[in-house]
Amino acid sequence: MNKGTVPIIARLHSLQAPVRVMSGGARVIAEAGDRNPVAHLLREANETMLARSLEFRSSAGPSLTLDVAGRRVLRLTACHGLPGAEACLGVEVLEDEHKDDLIKLLQAVAAPRQELRVVTGPVSREGSEVSVGLPVALLADLMLIDLNVTGPDNVPEEAEEYFEPKETPAVRLSGAGIEDFAAAIGSPLIAWLVRRSDGEATSDGPEDMVSHLQAFLEDESEAVVRQLDLVSAAPGDPACLMLGVTLIDGHGILCARLEDSLLLGVVAGDGTQTVLTAWRSLMA
């Protein structure tokens, strides 16, 4: 395998993770037997494109809530049952001086031998620019955590039951198709593949990258759909997910759905804002 494709496969692999959703919408991201639950927490934050709030809950009781955007932790908005949060709470934007205190809180809420859950919601405040905050990659580097995994750390025994999307999505769009989205991104989208429900496919980019995307989508399309359903208002709705930039070469994976089409793409690390702008234009 080409060394440059290893981080790409790592990001694709995260789409295969089984999903267990509890009552109230909390999603389990680390089981009690996972050896390094804080790694799951960071990967969850790293697989973020649009601004959102992530509330991490430990089965032991403590919890904390982060505003995250563009693979950066913007701020700590709530913390329960964890000492030492004063330095980060109430700060409009987390900066380098807060990283040590934040790391201690992350390690405390993601303590070993406890189940870790996450609840996703809208950001709590305005001003979620992706150019500020603490990069998730920096936090991972400081904690000696590899954000790129080519296999699951611990796979739950049972995956969440898969439900077919609704026949009629809750969001209806007119005109633009998913290829228009890819075209609007332009050069930051290094390679991409679109597959429709009838099996027809279109692609562009280096052949080795496209072939990896094609092989993955052929085997794991249901896993991709499940992940997109987690970030959409209703199953089958348009959705866009950016799997975090890697520590090796800066590439990320774009996953999007529009009507009956799925798109997987390889995006340059500096292309996040371009992808975000293109998706917002498509949704307008």
Image: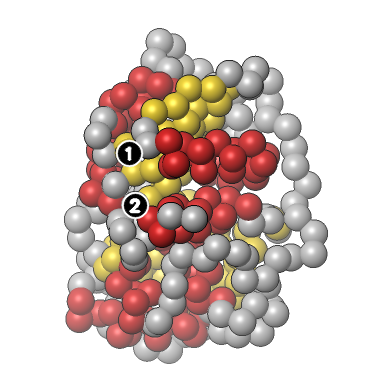
Position of 71 compared to 211: left or right? left
**Residue 225 place in picture, x, y as percent:** 62, 38
The residue depicted at 74 percent of the width and 37 percent of the height is: 163
Report helix, strand or loop for mark 1.
strand
Image quadrant occupied by the C terminus: top left
Residue at image location 58% in from the left, 50% down from the top: 15
Q: Which of the 4 image quarters holds residue 53?
A: bottom left
Helix, strand, or loop for circle 2?
A: loop
Q: Residues within 10 Å of mark 2 (few under 14, many from 20)?
A: many
Q: Which residue lies under the disc numbered 1? A: 190
From this viewpoint, is residue 123 visible? no
Q: In this view of the protein, which residue sits in the foreground, 63 or 28?
A: 28
Mark 1 in CB contact with mark 2 (< 8 angstroms): yes
Q: Is residue 265 left or right of residue 153?
A: left
Tell me residue 3's x, y (percent): 41, 59
Where 216 falls versus 184 (above or below)? below
The location of residue 255, given as percent across then percent down, is 47, 40
Residue flagged by tag 1: what amino acid is it?
Ile
Disc 1 from disc 2: Cα separation: 9 Å
Q: Which mark is residue 251?
A: 2
What amino acid is at disc 2? His
- Can you say whether 243 is above or below 134 in the image? above
Residue 242 coordinates in the image, percent (x, y): 42, 47
Q: Is residue 270 left or right of residue 19?
A: left
Q: Who's the residue at 53% across and 30% down the image?
A: 262
Nearest to the observer: residue 20 or residue 82: 20
Neighbour tally class for label 1: few under 14, some 14-19, many 20 plus, Cα within 10 Å: some
Let me know if residue 108 appears in the view.
yes
Q: Nearer the viewer, residue 273 or 232?
A: 273
